[in-house]
Image (spheres, grey):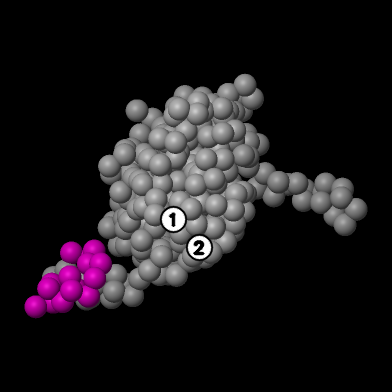
């Protein structure tokens, strides 16, 4: 089943002068075509300014197309009468969790969205607890959000979305403000949600290492899709990554260079251990 279908998506913003007069249009997304199946984990990779965040906002009607269409389970995001339906199906977290957190206590923040959509009191407690347990923050439920680490705050944001029971979660640069250990922990949690709870994941990132968690990589550059492939195959496409301003992990680049020089490698070794095994 198609979870998301994007057809000829173009997003343009007005360019104004100092007096606010529109002088031209700036095309941020330029003819995007993409289908995401239910249950997929897709990493949308690109450097700053490539159009990633604009694309993410189009998936739950925070931004509407200038032309073209975005369908979520068959619902067009342009349909004003279905915006609530779309946002119940597509939950979204942002780069800075402080911009999304509204309550001072963890479980109160997780409950916020549910209370706004009128979930029955009898169901409220169960959904809040289930979401916190699923994301691994149940033991933090009584803590003040301001005392949490960046990674923990991101988990609170995701728990609040998860409690709404979306079919799709879009994560816009969720690890850019946390350390490496927090990044790995968060991505492992997101991967588990995808595998165990079958939630479709769209991960927006500029870290090439993060694509290894996904089933599929979509590379955005200057508002266009320039690559759509598996993570391992993507590592072999060094020139395309470089042209898009994405630095390949050192070990993957070394493996690819050795293969080009005649070494018997697969070309997709991801760790020093794997590389050494093939060099024996």
Q: Which residues are magenta?
A: 266-280
Classify mark 1: helix, strand or loop: helix
Q: Position of residue 55 (x, y in %)?
A: 55, 45
**Residue labelled with disc 2:** 148
Which numbered disc covers residue 149?
A: none
Q: x%, y% of residue 27?
A: 65, 48
Q: Position of residue 90 (x, y in %)?
A: 49, 36
Residue plotted at (87% across, 48% down): 21
Residue at 52% across, 40% down: 111
Q: Which residue is mark 1?
A: 140
Horizontal arrangement in the rendering, residue 199 relative to residue 120 (left or right)? left
**Residue at x-position 49% and y-position 65%:** 149
- At mark 2, the secondary structure is loop
Left/right of residue 15 with respect to residue 119 in the rendered view = right
Which picture quadrant has residue 199?
top left
Is residue 99 something that shows in the picture? yes
152, 217: nearer the viewer: 152
Residue found at x 24% / y 71%: 271
Q: Nearer the viewer, residue 63 or 134?
A: 134
Q: Nearer the viewer, mark 1 or mark 2?
A: 1
Left-right relation of 48 to 44: right
Count of picture labels: 2
Proximity of marks 1 and 2: CB atoms separated by less than 8 Å: yes
């Amino acid at each position: 089943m198609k979870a998301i279908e994007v057809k000829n998506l173009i997003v343009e913003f007005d360019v104004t002068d100092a007096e606010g007069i529109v002088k031209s249009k700036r095309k941020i997304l330029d003819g995007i075509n993409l289908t995401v199946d239910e249950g997929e984990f897709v990493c949308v990779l690109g450097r700053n300014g490539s159009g990633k965040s604009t694309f993410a906002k189009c998936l739950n009607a925070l931004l509407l197309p200038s032309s073209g269409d975005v369908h979520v389970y068959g619902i067009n995001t342009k349909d004003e009468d279905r915006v609530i339906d779309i946002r119940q199906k597509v939950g979204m977290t942002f780069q800075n969790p402080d911009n999304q957190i509204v309550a001072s206590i963890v479980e109160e923040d997780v409950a916020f969205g549910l209370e706004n959509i009128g979930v029955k009191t009898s169901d409220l407690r169960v959904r809040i607890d289930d979401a916190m347990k699923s994301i691994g923050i149940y033991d933090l439920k009584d803590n003040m959000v301001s005392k949490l680490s960046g990674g923990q705050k991101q988990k609170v944001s995701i728990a609040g979305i998860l409690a709404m029971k979306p079919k799709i979660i879009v994560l816009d640069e969720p690890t850019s403000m946390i350390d490496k250990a927090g990044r790995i922990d968060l991505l492992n949690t997101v991967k588990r949600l995808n595998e165990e709870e079958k939630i479709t994941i769209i991960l927006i990132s500029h870290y090439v290492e993060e694509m290894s968690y996904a089933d599929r990589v979509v590379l955005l550059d200057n508002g266009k899709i320039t690559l759509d492939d598996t993570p391992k195959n993507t590592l072999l496409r060094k020139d395309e990554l470089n042209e898009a301003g994405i630095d390949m992990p050192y070990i993957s680049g070394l493996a690819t260079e050795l293969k080009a020089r005649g070494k018997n490698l697969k070309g997709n070794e991801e760790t020093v251990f794997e590389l050494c095994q093939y060099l024996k």
